[in-house]
Every structure is written in structure tokens, then in C-alpha cells.
Amino acid sequence: MPRSYPPEFRRKVLDLVKAGRPVRQVAEDLHMPSQTIYVWLRQDRIDSGLEPGLTSADQAELVAARRRIAELETELAVIRRAVELVREAVPPKGASRPSR
């Protein structure tokens, strides 16, 4: 399972690399995968507008939107099931009247 690092830690790691320290050395010193630092560097370039891609803010917004969509779909399924149950329990209006 991927490990989550606090944003302050990420910023400090990126500052070390931008100051000229080799990624491999920073990764060894901090006992973390160098690939993680490369991913952070790429995302930093995207967030800075230097590289095309989905910014961190856009990614967070997309995750929140997908979560909200899932909640709404669940609510809709519950409401649809409730309507089905009501239709089964209550006969349609006028069903007991004789037709003319």
C-alpha cells in the first residue's frame, strides 16, 4: 500500500532537490523510493504550468466530484427502491372503483 507523506515534507524534499541535491541521495537519506520524488517533481512542474497535465487542485476537485456522484447515485437507488416498495404496498388510486 502506498505511503502518504504530509505536504510540508514533500515541499522540503522538493526544495532539497531543487537546491541541487541528487534525487537518489535524497531518497537514500530519507529512506524512501526515488521514484516517489520523481513523481512529486513532475507534479510540481505541472502545478507550476511548466508541463501539461492535471494540476493537484484539479485532481482534488475531480476526486471530490466523483465521491459526490457516488453518494448521489446511492441516494437515488434508495429512493427508487422506496418508491417500488410503496407501489407494492399501496394500490393505485381508483383501483377499487368499478369501471363504467
Image (spheres, rainbow, N blue to C red):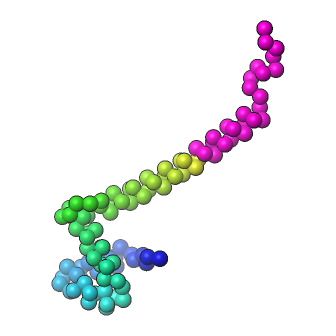
Q: As displayed, is residue 19 above or below residue 90?
A: below
The segment highlighted magenta reads 76-100
Q: How many marks?
A: 0
> Is residue 88 found inside the magenta-colored segment of the image?
yes
Q: Is residue 12 visible?
A: no
Quarter of the image holding residue 3?
Answer: bottom left
- Residue depicted at x 33% and y 78%: 36
- Residue 95 in the image: state x and y as whole percent: 78, 21
- Residue 29 in the image: state x and y as whole percent: 31, 91
74 or 14: nearer the viewer: 74
Q: Please, which residue is most extreme toward the top here?
A: 100
Q: Is residue 86 visible?
A: yes
Locate residue 74 relative to residue 18 in the image: left or right. Answer: right
Q: Please, which residue is most extreme toward the front here?
A: 99
> Is residue 97 found inside the magenta-colored segment of the image?
yes
Quarter of the image holding residue 30?
Answer: bottom left
Locate residue 83 relative to residue 71 in the image: left or right. Answer: right
Locate residue 26 relative to residue 61 in the image: left or right. Answer: left
Locate residue 93 relative to residue 9 in the image: left or right. Answer: right
- Residue depicted at x 58% and y 44%: 76
Q: As displayed, is residue 32 above or below residue 40?
A: below
- Residue depicted at x 48% and y 55%: 67
Quarter of the image holding residue 52?
Answer: bottom left
- Residue depicted at x 38% and y 60%: 60
- Residue 50 in the image: state x and y as whole percent: 18, 64
